[in-house]
Amino acid sequence: MTYLSRVRINPLRAASRTLLANPRALHGAVMAGIPDASPDDRVLWRLDGDHPRRPMLLALTPTKPDWTHIVEQAGWPDADGEHYAVRDYHPLLAQLATGREFAFRLTASPVQNTSTPDKSSPHRTKTAADLHHRSYRVPHRTAAQQLTWFLERTPRWGFDIPPARTDTPAPGLEPHAAGTQPAREVRITDRNRHSFSKPGTRTPVTLTTATFEGRLRITDPHVFQTSLLAGIGPSKAYGCGLLTLAPLSPREP
């Protein structure tokens, strides 16, 4: 069984501030909610900050989790309402079919592999030379690069992004490449750069992310299901790769 969870976070608590600022710490809290979790388990999670006063943690887990520890340490344990929700994921998987369309959200870490990075730190250069690496993983930093990274890879993930439904793209609907491709129904709603420590290393981990939202159309249900369950792109342990779906709103006349 696979489960999708939503957990309310109280950003004013001390423990919450640690989790919100450090993806490695939040990953540890997520893994602590999964009984008998092993390193081989594929666990995806994402932190949504639509409402700054009530960020939401989403997690996709291979077994049913218990988020009591997060509620007690970083939520509103004595408040009314649903502190967290856990839902069976298989009813959604049963709806996947070629041509089916959904609204989506994805936070990913767009990167490229290159043998000649523009800005290579001395530490990274030395490590690559010692290990005989032939390429580096370098983050895309501009919104245009990140959007191109996303649109070029959707076929391998089992879906595509339909053209925008308006003659003139509405705000936030970005063209694939100016003057060469029609506008697609996708936008970048958030971009972040995180830096945090990792045990056993002196050099901090730097993570560049982009959150994509829009409308997708399934082209290969089997591949698409794999993308949902296995995640998209790198840095999955740090809150990237979870693609979530929602029904489309009725089209405006």
Image: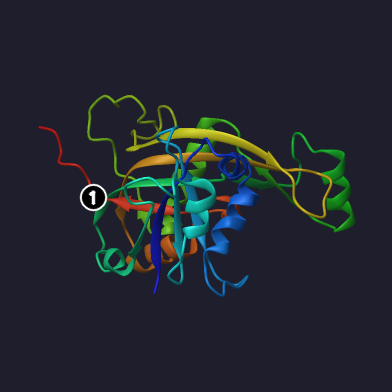
Identified at 49% across, 54% down, the residue is 45
- The image shows residue 67 at horizontal and vertical percentages of 47, 59
Count of labels in the image: 1
User: Which residue is located at x 45 percent, y 72 percent?
Assistant: 63
The answer to which of 79 and 6 lies nearer the viewer is: 79
Residue 213 in the image: state x and y as whole percent. Answer: 38, 40
* On-image quarter of the N terminus: bottom left
| Left or right of residue 93, residue 45 in this image | right
The quarter in which the C terminus is drawn is top left
- Vertical relation: 164 (above or below) 151: above
Please provide percent x and percent y for residue 39.
Answer: 63, 70
Q: Is residue 63 left or right of residue 201?
A: left
Q: Quadrant of residue 221?
A: bottom left
The answer to whether residue 109 is seen in the rendering is: yes
Tell me the amino acid under the disc marked 1: Pro
| x and y percentages locating residue 14 in the rendered image | 60, 39
Read off the residue under disc 1.
247
In this figure, which colouring scheme has been used for the structure? Answer: rainbow
> Is 219 located above or below residue 105 in the figure?
below
Left or right of 25 in this view: 154: left
* Res 232 visible: no
Report the front residue among 94 and 8. Answer: 8
SS at mark 1?
loop
Q: Residue at x 45, y 37 (%)?
A: 49
Query: How dense is the environment of label 1, judged by Cα within 10 Å: few (below 14), some, or many (20 and up)?
Result: few
**In the image, is residue 176 above or below residue 24?**
above
Residue at 61% of width from left, 45% of height from top? 111
